[in-house]
Image (cartoon, rainbow, N blue to C red):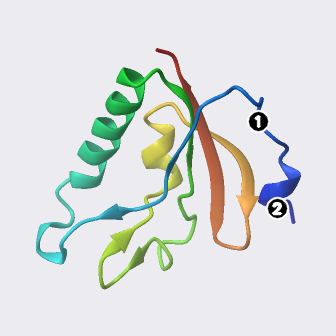
């Protein structure tokens, strides 16, 4: 298994942003709100000078959402926005990155 620490450090002067999960009320799920939130976050990061953006979606649909409140997204959701897979994270996750210029 390739763990996060073995992926390697980022250059010291690089801004690092993390998108860890999305909070969508259960009554509003399935309407594309996470995609809207992702695009808004990426635009906000760009306005703040960009940098490397990390995301941690899960590869198992059973693990993609915690029923109570949060959703981690899927690799395809992030891939569609230009993220690339960097390394697996345990049995159900994947580290993805995208670089955004200023």
Between 13 and 88, the one lying in front of the other is 13
In the drawing, does residue 24 fall left or right of residue 52? left
In the drawing, does residue 67 fall left or right of residue 13? left
Using the image, determine if residue 34 lies above or below residue 48.
below
The extreme left residue here reads 27
* Residue at 57% from the left image edge and 57% from the top image edge: 56
**Residues at circles 2 and 1 in contact by the CB criterion of under 8 Å:** no
- Image coords of residue 62 (percent x, y): 48, 79
- Image coords of residue 9 (percent x, y): 81, 41
Element carrying mark 2: loop
In the drawing, does residue 6 fall left or right of residue 56? right
Using the image, determine if residue 44 lies above or below residue 57.
above
Between 95 and 19, the one lying in front of the other is 19
Element carrying mark 1: loop
The residue at which mark 2 appears reads as 3
Find the distance from the CA under tag 2 to the CA under tag 1.
15 Å
* Residue at 11% from the left image edge and 74% from the top image edge: 27
* Residue at 53% from the left image edge and 59% from the top image edge: 57
**Foreground disc of the pair 2, 1:** 1
Using the image, determine if residue 28 lies above or below residue 46.
below
The extreme front residue here reads 13
* Residue at 42% from the left image edge and 61% from the top image edge: 21
The quarter in which the N terminus is drawn is bottom right
Please tell me how many numbered marks the rendered image carries: 2
In the drawing, does residue 30 fall left or right of residue 45? left
- Image coords of residue 2 (percent x, y): 85, 60
- Image coords of residue 22 (percent x, y): 34, 61
The disc label shown at residue 10, or none: 1
- The crowd level at tag 2 (other Cα within 10 Å; few <14, some 14-19, many 20+) is few
- Which of the two discs, 2 and 1, labels the residue nearer the N terminus? 2
């Amino acid at each position: 298994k390739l763990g996060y620490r073995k992926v390697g450090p980022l250059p010291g002067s690089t801004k690092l942003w993390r998108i860890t999960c999305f909070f969508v009320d259960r009554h509003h799920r399935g309407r594309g709100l996470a995609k809207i939130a992702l695009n808004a976050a990426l635009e906000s990061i760009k306005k703040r000078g960009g940098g490397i953006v990390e995301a941690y979606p899960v590869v198992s649909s059973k693990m993609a959402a915690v029923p109570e409140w949060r959703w981690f997204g899927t690799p395809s959701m992030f891939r569609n926005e230009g993220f690339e897979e960097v390394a697996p994270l345990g049995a159900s996750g994947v580290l993805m990155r995208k670089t955004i210029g200023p």
